[in-house]
Image (cartoon, helix red, strand yellow):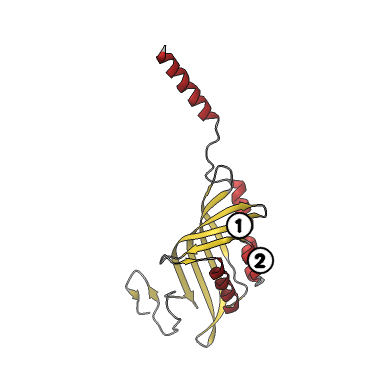
Amino acid sequence: MKRQQVVTLLTWVVMLMSTMPAPAQDDAGVRKELEAQYQRLAEAHDKRDLKAIVGLKTADFHVIFPDGRVGDSKVMEQYSKQFLESNQPPYNIKFTIQKLTVSENQLIAVAEVSQEATRYRELAGGRRKVDTSVVQRETWTKTNDGWKLKLVDNVRDQKRFVDGKRVDPSKQYDPDAPPYDPDGGGTKAP
């Protein structure tokens, strides 16, 4: 009799589990909503609208930099302000979601994102074209006002080019420096 009860219980558990929705991994609807938020973020940059940029982020938005430092929402607002003041639009910012994982209740979305931007900036006495790219993980949370960016971490694969020449993003721009080669010891002769 006990064996029959165990079999019945196991059958019931399997049936119950099969009726439960599987955790969402990449939800096309959420992807579309996040792509719209990325478009709003790019447009806010082109309009130099700091309030709109900050408005697409949660109050506790923060970044964990590659070196482990944490940039809270106030630090990141200042960073955005400095970016807008130092660079000339249009910024041609492009976000590409490479991978998306969505929580079962569609309240949290974690995206691996490639971000590319092109803009002009005054550097070393001249107007120069600056191209940057980075891959990072971005955590979004669903709010009453739609999806908002909560966290950026796992920042990697950063690249910076000035007038087509790769430069070390951690150093001040030097137009006479050889192209940056991170895989070959830092720089190499042109």
Asked if 162 appears above or below 42 in the picture, the reply is below
Asked if 73 appears above or below 170 in the picture, the reply is above
Camera-nearest residue between 149 and 155: 149
Could you say where residue 46 lies in the image, as x and y percent from the top left?
64, 70
Camera-nearest residue between 20 and 160: 20
Could you say where residue 129 lies in the image, as x and y percent from the top left?
54, 77
Give the amino acid type for the residue marked by disc 1 in the picture: Lys
- In primary-sequence order, the first of circles 2 and 1 is 2
Query: Where, quadrant-wise, is the C terminus in this rendering?
Result: bottom left
- Give the farthest residue toward the left: 185
Query: How far separated are the C-alphas under marks 2 and 1?
Result: 12 Å
Could you say where residue 7 lies in the image, as x and y percent from the top left?
44, 18
Query: Where, quadrant-wise, is the N terminus in this rendering?
Result: top left
Q: Which residue, given by chain and number where applicable, does mark 1 sit on?
A: 148
> Contact (CB < 8 A) between labels 2 and 1?
no
Residue in view at x 64 percent, y 56 percent: 36
Q: Secondary structure at mark 2?
A: helix
Q: Which residue, given by chain and number where applicable, does mark 2 sit on?
A: 52
Dot 1 alpha-carbon crowd within 10 angstroms: few under 14, some 14 to 19, many 20 or more: many
Could you say where residue 112 lies in the image, as x and y percent from the top left?
50, 55
Q: Secondary structure at mark 1?
A: strand
Q: Please tell me the numbered disc located at residue 13.
A: none
Give the amino acid type for the residue marked by disc 2 in the picture: Ala
Q: How many marks?
A: 2
Q: Is 103 placed left or right of 190 in the picture?
A: right
Which image quadrant is residue 169 in?
bottom left
Which image quadrant is residue 175 in?
bottom left
